[in-house]
Structures are given as C-alpha cells and as structure tokens.
Amino acid sequence: MASEKFEKILGKDSEYLLGHVCKTIPKEKLHLPGPDWVDRIFSSSDRNVRVLRSLQTLYGNGRLANTGYLSILPVDQGIEHSAGASFAPNPEYFDPENIVKLAIEGGCNAVASTSGVLGIVARKYAHKIPFILKFNHNEFISYPNTYDQIMFATIEKAYEMGCVAVGATIYFGSEESKRQIVEVSQAFEIAHEMGMATVLWCYLRNAGFKTKDKDYHTAADLTGQANHLGATIQADIIKQKLPTNNGGFKALNFSKFSEKMYTELSSDHPIDLTRYQVVNNYMGRIGLINSGGPSGENDLQQAAVTAVINKRAGGMGLISGRKAFQKPMKDGIKILNTIQDVYLSKEITIA
C-alpha cells in the first residue's frame, strides 16, 4: 500500500526516483541515519555530554522519533522576505504561537525560528517541542537591498529560553563570508560549550555564480564544498538546497576540481547529485537536511519528491517551511506528514 501511495503522489517521477540505482559512492561506504545515530556518530566525538543529550532530544521527538531522521519546521522568512509577504497567504502565522502549534500538530522533531518568535512563547512550549534558535539573518528593509547575514541574538539567549540547538546561515562565496565564518564558528563553539547542538544553513551567494544559461548556486560541486566547510566549523546538522545541476567550478573556471567529481562521484541524476552533498558531509557523519523550497503549485508532490531524493541519497530529512505555513493549518500538517511518511516507509530505501 505504501508504494502505491507514493507512486500516486510522485506521478511520472515515480519510476525515475524509486527505481534508481546509485552508480557513484555506494551506500555501504556512507554513515546512514538510524535509531543509534547519536551513539554511533557523536559519542566518539569531542561534543560534551550535554550536547549529546540535546541531540538525542532533537532526534527523539515527533513522528520520526528515534529513526535517525528529522522533520523540522523553519519559520524565519518574516525577516528577509518581509512578514507581510511571508504571512499574507495565511495571516494567522503572524502569531508566533501558531507557528509552534503547526510544528507540534505536524509531528515535527523541532521548530526553528527567531529569538522573538520563540522567546514570546518559550515558557509555554520549550518543554513540549525542541526549539532551534536561528541567531543570524539577512534583512531587506535596508535600502538598497544587500545580502549579508548579521547577528540578531546571542547564544546565551538561546540557552536561557531552553533551546536544544542553535542555527545560522553563512553565505559562502560572498564578500562577507569570511566574517560570517568567523562569527558562526565562534558562536557554535559557545553553543557546544553550553550544551546545545548546531545547525548550519550552508547557502551560496555571489552574482558570479549565475550565468546567462545556468544558476550554479545549486550546483552539486559548489554546494558540496559549502557543506564541507560547514562540517569543518562543527555544524552537527547541515541544511542545503537540493542540487539541480553540476559543474560550477568548471563552468566558472575557479577554485580546484577533479574530473572524477563529475564522473565517478556524481551523475546527472538528482539522487546522485544529492549523494555528492552527503559525501562532502564527512561521508554522512554530519547529517544532510535539504530545504523544502518555496510554496507554489503541486506542493504536496514537490515535497514528496524532495524527501524521496534526500532519503535515497543518504540524507537525514527535510526542513520545510513555506510549503507548510503558507496554507491552512490542516493542509500544512498534511504536507509535513507526507514528508515524514517518506522517511517512515520501509519500501523507500537508500539507493
């Protein structure tokens, strides 16, 4: 029944995705998600006991509890995309409590949001669902618009409101990226010292990454390297956009690359492209969660496709916001549950 359900949701993509056999890095060489994830990966690391407890709390909540997979609701778009544009489709989410309610009712492992959103309801909900405080943001009220991640909150504030983890974005490739790397690296070190886990949005941002013909902001080679840098500064979980192409280093003629990156380590198939992202996460030791993308038409199908690609590539889950909160709550819950059902399905296996 499960396979029939997903074949119907995936439609014409069903055989292409569910029937794919990975011909690049075999799954046996990866560190794959599982119920013993924290013990298997982090108990031998330098993370302290309190971080291990926080990670286990994160992995032990929601419909995916104790599977090694994650379903996270992120709602910080009100800062960069403007609250009006973000919440106009469903104004009830101007109220932070409804954001947290959606994460709980939707069976998520955690909710990730701003210090303002989480702080205003912390005493009521911090013990009911794991909080992830996103402490830096890009804001678009400055004119003209610029792209830079700046600090909006302290790690101490996250600790005080009972967060199990903190999150941040680095715009790798931007002029400001070196400063952001230092800021986030230092903040992650403090978070670990205080017993919280770390989640990094490893995004690319540079006008030079986009040509007339192709946008390499989602190239597997560039995003893979961004992931590798994120693992280097001790992110425990990495969020990345799903790759849509490859060959950015070659096309843009910068950095260093090997032809094997595009032949033996990847292919044009989306599962193989995503597998390359996982490989750059220390062969999967640092979990890869892909973003759900913007809301639009066929959101349920698109969310399921993204989840199937991530899971079959060896990823750890999805962090999906706009597809869920820009709809009536019951429809948002349905999308979140469909994503989770992909990871709960024993018939959807690692390619």
Image (cartoon, rainbow, N blue to C red):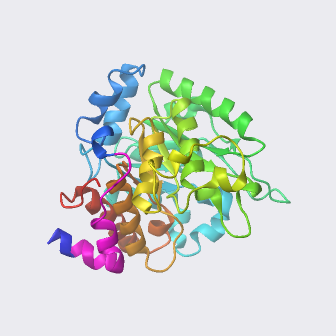
Total numbered labels: 0
Q: Quadrant of residue 258?
A: top right
Query: Quick check: 84 left or right of 40?
Result: right
Where residue 106 appears, as percent x and y from the top left, is 34, 61
Q: In the displayed orientation, state which residue is furthest to the right.
A: 144
SS assignment for the magenta stretch, majority? helix
Task: Establish if 79 lies above or below 52.
Answer: below
Task: Establish if 165 lies above or below 261.
Answer: above
Q: Say whether residue 134 is visible.
A: no
Where residue 101 appears, as percent x and y from the top left, is 39, 58
Where residue 239 appears, as percent x and y from the top left, is 50, 48
Query: Quick check: 134 left or right of 98?
Result: right
Q: Nearer the viewer, residue 162 or 331?
A: 331
Q: Quadrant of the C terminus?
A: bottom left
Task: Establish if 343 lies above or below 164.
Answer: below
Please report the residue visible at 71 percent of the width from the left and 54 percent of the height from the top. 252
Q: In the displayed orientation, state which residue is furthest to the left.
A: 1
Q: Quadrant of residue 213?
A: bottom right
Per the rendered image, the range of residues in magenta is 5-25
Please report the residue visible at 63 percent of the width from the left and 57 percent of the height from the top. 217
Q: Quadrant of the N terminus?
A: bottom left
Query: Quick check: 154 left or right of 351?
Result: right
Q: Nearer the viewer, residue 29 or 327?
A: 29
Residue 238 lies within the magenta run: no
Please report the residue visible at 52 percent of the width from the left and 28 percent of the height from the top. 191
